[in-house]
Structures are given as C-alpha cells and as structure tokens.
Image (cartoon, rainbow, N blue to C red):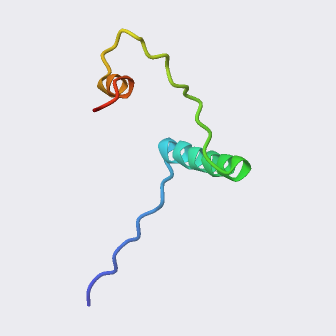
C-alpha cells in the first residue's frame, strides 16, 4: 500500500494580498463607472516631431 501524500498548507503572501486588493478595487471601479478609469493623460506632442500620418492628412493625395 502506498503512503498518503501530505497536502500543502495554503500560505498567503503579502504579494498575493496586494494583488487581491488591487483586483477588488478595479472591479469596484468598473461597477461604479461602467469602465476602468484612466488616470494617465496623453502628453502634449511637440510640433517639431516628424509625423508621417499628419503630413499625409495635410497634403491631399491626387
């Protein structure tokens, strides 16, 4: 007869705790607003930066 395997005890680490809290906060935010809220705003783009798409929009193609 084979010996029984020992079951591993569940250890909740601090990282697991933080991850669970972040997930819960995100779900609450989605419930309140209907979508996730973005706190990062788009930075101002310099006019001096070369932008091929913008150039194509300004010059109509023939």
Q: Residue at x 34, y 24 (%)?
A: 59
Determine whether, in the image, residue 44 is placed left or right of residue 39.
left
Work out whether residue 44 or residue 12 is closer to the camera in this orientation and state it. Answer: 44
Q: Residue at x 58, y 35 (%)?
A: 38
Work out whether residue 40 or residue 58 is closer to the camera in this orientation and state it. Answer: 58
Residue at the front extreme, as displayed: 62
Position of the C terminus, as image quadrant, is top left
Residue 61, quarter of the rendered image: top left
| Residue 4 place in picture, x, y as percent | 34, 80
Position of the N terminus, as image quadrant, is bottom left
Q: Measured along the vertical axis of the image, is residue 12 above or below residue 47?
A: below
Q: Residue at x 51, y 42 (%)?
A: 14
Q: Residue at x 37, y 71 (%)?
A: 6
| Residue 54 place in picture, x, y as percent | 37, 24
Q: How many labels sit on residues?
A: 0
| Residue 27 place in picture, x, y as percent | 63, 52
């Amino acid at each position: 007869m084979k010996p029984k395997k020992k079951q591993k005890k569940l250890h909740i680490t601090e990282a697991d705790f933080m991850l669970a809290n972040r997930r819960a906060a995100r779900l609450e935010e989605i419930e309140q607003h209907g979508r996730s809220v973005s706190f990062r705003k788009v930075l101002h783009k310099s006019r001096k930066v070369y932008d091929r798409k913008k150039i194509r929009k300004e010059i109509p193609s023939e």
